[in-house]
Image (cartoon, rainbow, N blue to C red):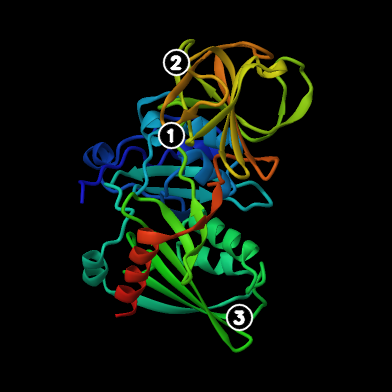
Amino acid sequence: MNSVRWVAILALAMVAGRAVHATPVHAAAKAAGPVAKPSACVDHRVDVAAGDSAYSILRRSGIAAGDAMRWLAPTHHGRSLRDLHAGDVLTFCTVGTRRDGIRLAAVGVMHRQARMRPSLESIRAAGTVRETLVVKSSLEHALRERRVSWHLVDAVHAYLRDDRDLPARLPRGTRVVATFSGNPSQYGARLLCLDVELHGRRHRLFHYVDAHGRQYVLGDHGHGVRILAMEKPLRHARISSGWGWRINPVLKRREFHKGIDYAAPLGTPIRAALAGVVEIAAWHGNYGRMVDVHAASSIDNRYGHLSRFAAGIRPGVHVRAGQVIGYVGATGLATGPHLYFELWERHRRVDPLIREPVTTARLDGRARRRFAAFIRRLDA
């Protein structure tokens, strides 16, 4: 495990509405000893999953977009918060309620080496823990209470939505036995399996990670969904406008912003968030120069306002995740250089900061045999 480094903690003046540069915890400890938190402060601890960002985690927790973006301002610590990776831990403290408005009082990040694939040895070392979950409002809510990542919860929901033997929403009172590697109340635990008893039948869902690090939610027959972990289209970029209502800076009217704006200098390389086939690489109305990548059967992502395309980017070309596909510009309806990024799922735009797209998956051949071996080892 890598050494833990806190990058930002306890800027209490934010509660009073002032943006203050956060202080590294080790420096604060040397200067003033232990730092007292507000008595009403509520602690949060979130394990960062692939595709997560500090902004998406804070927004899911009820933090207003403007408050979250102030913490991600282009300071040294803001840059650290923007550079999260799977396996890191984001901690923050909030005051207020959803009715009155939730405000940030402290933010910190512990950088750790990502360990996405639980090997048999790591499972044995951590031990398996089984917990019985009783569905009250939804299975997704019960899993979130056990610190299961948003992306995995979304994948479980997608599996249930497409499975013909289980309802998309399990009835209240359904008992589900969840198997974890390690204690689910502590960092590092991994969901391995869900056993659902419904109408006298047993159904099993497995969280499986293959040799290439690809994550799946599968039934014991090897059918299910695969999580498409997205790369960041711009590295270390600041989000200048997030998903949601805003005043259009060009048209000066209220609109719902159905994408993410990343502020970056002219000519900054833009990377494909997902592997796929280029559908469009041309001027496209208000998008200006745009690249559209078809990543899966129902998944597309768009990159707008480009100054130019990367060499070889044209319709029909296959691109890999992380490959440079163009460069930041201000073409189309734009006030300055930035990237406009959209994620399309099932022919509608979704928030790319809180959604990890999934696609249907079916394991065959050697992959199916390896999955069967994983089930045997888990049962043993």
Q: Say whether residue 318 is left or right of residue 192.
A: right
Query: Left or right: 76 with respect to 143?
Result: left
Q: Which residue is mark 1?
A: 321
Nearer to us in this view, 335 or 4:
335
Counting from the top left corner in percent of width and height, residue 330 is at: 59, 11
Name the quadrant containing residue 280: top right
Q: Marks 2/3: CA distance?
A: 51 Å
Q: Is residue 281 visible?
A: yes
Query: CB atoms at circles 2 and 3 under 8 Å apart?
Result: no
Mark 3 burial class by Cα count in 10 Å: few <14, some 14-19, many 20+: some
User: Where residue 108 sits in the image (x, y, percent)?
Assistant: 37, 43
In the rendered structure, find residue 268 and report the number of the disc placed on it. Answer: 2
Where residue 84 appears, as percent x and y from the top left, is 38, 39
Mark found first going from the N terminus, 3 or 1: 3
Tag 3 secondary structure:
loop
The type of residue carrying mark 2 is Thr
Residue denoted by label 3: 174
Image coordinates of residue 109 in percent, x first then y, are 35, 43
